[in-house]
Image (cartoon, coloured by chain):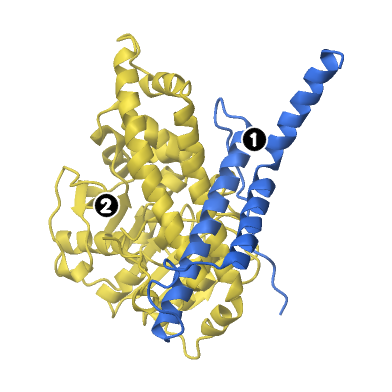
Chain colours: A blue, B yellow
């Protein structure tokens, strides 16, 4: 049987006085992201507990984990990539401002 | 503390959409977010409102809540609180819809009941009332009248309703209001022995099943505006062993015969309708009841039983941003006058303490609210 997708947008969302649509869009994205992170964290926790339960991981092993040099390097790159990805708009905004001041000062 | 937990199977009735690990965590996240919004953000807004209310000129008396609203709207935190409250509600329906869609096949299989005790009657020509169409109640996408030919909207309403009430309303059965309405009947008439009962605005039957359980020999009917939620209500009732006959009808005008019921009741129906509909529903109750029959309407606490401006404003905001079409109308109605006008006598208006199981009481009724969720407003009268 072919099934129709359930609707996701309610009919009638009154504007909140003094708020921009963008504010609500941001809020929606932040709630969704917080939800994703919470689910991810719980899933990781469940994985750890199951691994410990089944003897594949020792309790405290993750907190006590000391990566070797190669692993440290790879983890460093992962963190850098995250920072660059998440905060790209701020870097772009700063570069744009810089370009503007350079242009107006004639250099 | 709260009856939604990670112990999934224990609390669920057989038909309720059972979430996966991730879905459950997301639903608990919504619950926690709602508790944060209600428990951490809202009290601060209440404090701001108290200060703002004191600053209002004494001459503002008529529309004090409106005047307070204008002052509150100047605060950015007031606006983010409102936006966050609404977003938590939207997120609730979204995550529940995902979970229901994932197990749609299984739910439809469970809904195939071999020898049903009750029945369901839907009506493709049903004229959905304007107050239902104007905005999706509680922001549930598609609204109460949504019908795609399946029972999935009912499954969304069931699971979402239990999370929405944060488990305060009878856990996953979400049936405290129905139990409380029936407990009121037994408070008035301990030996009540009805032949036919009607629950108006029954939704997925959370308020209807308690009547069928308390009066197993009685023919119990439930009506509502949505075919999908009624199909689900039917399957849910069957899984709970309750014989209920559901039909798609407006409480303003049903196709039941005159004087054909001993009890007609509703749970939080009026604030989802309109003032004109309330009058029609009262008249319809009178028509449907045999002389001496009982009408019972359960609602949220009345506004004039709350005193401060913030409570009134907060209610108005809830009504507007969570789409409650007749919040103010239902909460300020003169139920004494409405019931007397419709021809009812032996009127009772007040508060019935929340009941876990109607037959176990508590069998007391008084003029004062015992607190939100601890008691419910009830207006009842004899035809």
The front one of B207 and B223 is: B207
Q: Is residue B7 above or below residue B68?
A: below
Subunit under mark 1: A
Instruction: Look at discs 1 and 2 and give the one toward the viewer.
Output: 1
Name the spot of residue B336 as percent of width and height, x first. Answer: 26, 40
Up/down of B375 relative to B71, above or below: below
For this orientation, the residue located farthest to the bottom is B114
Q: What element carries label 2?
A: loop
List x then y, in percent, for residue B211: 30, 70
Relative to the observer, which residue lies in front, B95 or B228? B95
Q: Quadrant location of residue B307?
A: top left
Q: Can residue B348 be seen in this view?
A: no
Q: Mark 2 points at which residue?
A: B373
Chain for disc number 2: B
Indicate the position of residue B93 as horizontal and vertical percent values: 53, 57
Q: Mark 1 points at which residue?
A: A22
Q: How far apart are marks 1 and 2 (CA)?
A: 36 Å
Callout 2 crowding tier (Cα within 10 Å): few <14, some 14–19, many ≥20? some
B307 shown above or below B185: above
Q: Look at the image and tell me in which quarter the C terminus of chain B lies.
A: bottom left
């Amino acid at each position: 049987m072919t099934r129709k997708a359930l609707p996701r947008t309610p009919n009638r969302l009154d504007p909140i006085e003094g708020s921009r649509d963008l504010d609500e869009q941001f809020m929606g994205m932040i709630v969704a992201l917080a939800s994703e992170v919470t689910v991810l964290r719980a899933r990781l926790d469940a994985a750890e507990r199951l691994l410990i339960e089944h003897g594949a991981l020792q309790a405290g092993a993750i907190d006590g984990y000391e990566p070797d040099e190669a692993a440290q390097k790879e983890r460093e790159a992962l963190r850098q990539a995250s920072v660059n990805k998440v905060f790209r708009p701020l870097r772009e905004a700063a570069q744009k401002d810089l370009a503007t001041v350079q242009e107006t000062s004639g250099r | 503390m709260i009856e939604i937990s990670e112990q999934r199977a224990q609390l669920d009735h057989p038909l309720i959409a059972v979430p996966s690990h991730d879905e459950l965590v997301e639903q608990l996240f919504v619950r926690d977010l709602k508790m944060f919004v209600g428990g951490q953000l809202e009290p601060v807004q209440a404090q701001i409102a108290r200060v703002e209310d004191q600053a209002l000129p004494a001459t503002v008396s008529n529309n004090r809540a409106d005047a307070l609203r204008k002052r509150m709207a100047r605060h950015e935190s007031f606006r983010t609180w409102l936006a966050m409250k609404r977003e938590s509600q939207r997120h609730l329906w979204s995550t529940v819809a995902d979970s229901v869609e994932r197990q749609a096949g299984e739910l439809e299989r469970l809904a195939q009941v071999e020898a049903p005790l009750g029945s369901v009657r839907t009506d493709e020509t049903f004229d959905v009332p304007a107050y239902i169409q104007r905005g999706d109640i509680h922001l549930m996408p598609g609204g109460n009248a949504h019908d795609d030919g399946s029972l999935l909207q009912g499954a969304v309403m069931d699971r979402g309703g239990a999370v929405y009430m944060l488990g305060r309303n009878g856990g996953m059965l979400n049936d405290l209001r129905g139990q409380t309405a029936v407990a009121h009947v037994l408070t008035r008439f301990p030996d009540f022995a009805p032949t036919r009962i009607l629950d108006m605005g029954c939704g997925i039957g959370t308020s209807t099943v308690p009547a069928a359980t308390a009066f197993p020999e009685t023919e119990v009917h439930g009506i509502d505006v949505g075919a999908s939620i009624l199909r689900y209500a039917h399957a849910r009732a069957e899984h709970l062993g309750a014989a209920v006959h559901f039909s798609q009808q407006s409480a303003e005008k049903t196709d039941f015969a005159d004087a054909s019921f001993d009890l007609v009741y509703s749970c939080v129906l009026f604030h989802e309708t309109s003032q004109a509909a309330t009058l029609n529903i009262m008249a319809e109750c009178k028509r449907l009841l045999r002389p001496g029959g009982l009408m019972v309407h359960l609602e949220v606490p009345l506004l004039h039983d709350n005193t401060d401006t913030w409570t009134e404003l907060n209610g108005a905001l809830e009504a507007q941003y969570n789409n409650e079409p007749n919040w103010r109308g239902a909460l300020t109605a003169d139920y004494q006058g409405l019931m007397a006008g419709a021809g009812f006598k032996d009127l009772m208006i007040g508060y019935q303490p929340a009941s876990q199981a109607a037959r176990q009481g508590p069998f007391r009724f008084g003029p004062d609210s015992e607190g939100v969720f601890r008691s419910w407003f009830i207006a009842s009268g004899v035809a």
